[in-house]
Amino acid sequence: MNWPAWALISLVAGVLLAGCVAGEGKPAAGRGETGLKTLSVEELRQGLENKDFFLVDVHVPEQEHFPQTDAFIPYDAIESNLGSLPKDKNAKIVLYCRTDRMSGIAGEKLVRLGYTNVYHVVGGKVAWDGMASD
């Protein structure tokens, strides 16, 4: 194979690899209205003033909860605990954990199961505690 062919193959492979890696660590990025959405800790704080959502801590092990938490469901057991969530798959559900990794995993699972109004808190409990100390 000649040099231009190798260059073209390398370029195509690099573009494909970059596309695969770009989405890692950001489960909510690039999603439409029915995908997992994000919520900042400030947006959560404001939302708690007139709460209209179901708030779930999914962190393992269990941790100190945000105020007004409705349930604790381990992120890796979310599918086997659907009975603890609102029956309406269009109800607003907000998930959080310590940083946001576990809530992202649990949120993506709920979206795949047909839940349409799922959010997870960016930065999780760490960001919440940081906001309180500012």
Image (cartoon, grey):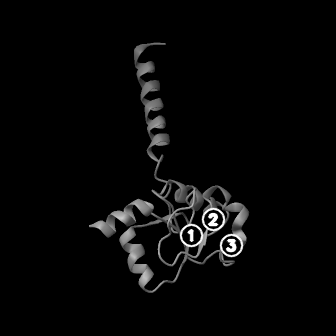
Q: Is residue 122 visible?
A: no
Q: Is residue 51 left or right of residue 105?
A: left
Near-viewer residue (11 or 42): 42
Q: Label 1, on which residue? A: 56
Instruction: Work out how far the residue at label 2 is from the one at label 3, CA to CA, in angstroms.
Output: 8 Å
- Three-letter amino acid code at disc 2? Ile
Secondary structure under tag 2 reads: loop
**Kind of residue at disc 3:** Ser
Q: Badge 1: how crowded within 10 Å, few (<14), some, or many (20+)?
A: many
Q: Are the residues tagged 1 and 2 within 8 Å (C-beta)?
A: yes
In 3D space, how far apart are the residues under numbered discs 1 and 3 (Cα atoms)? 10 Å
Question: Residue 8 at x, y = what percent?
Answer: 43, 25
Alpha-carbon neighbours of circle 2 within 10 Å: few (<14), some, or many (≥20)? many
Q: Which residue in the protein does label 2 denote? A: 73
Quick check: 110 left or right of 126? Answer: right
Q: Quadrant of residue 85?
A: bottom right
Residue 90 spot, x, y in % from top left: 61, 76
Mark 2 and mark 3 residues within 8 Å of each other at the beta carbon? yes
Q: Which mark is residue 84?
A: 3
Q: Sequence order check: which comes first, mark 1 or mark 2? A: 1
Q: Quick one: label 1 or label 3, which is nearer the N terminus?
A: 1
User: What residue occupies the far left of the structure in this picture?
Assistant: 134
Q: Position of residue 121 (x, y in %)?
A: 46, 65
Give the residue displayed 57% in from the left and 62% down from the top: 58
* Quadrant occupied by the C terminus: bottom left
Q: Secondary structure at mark 3?
A: helix
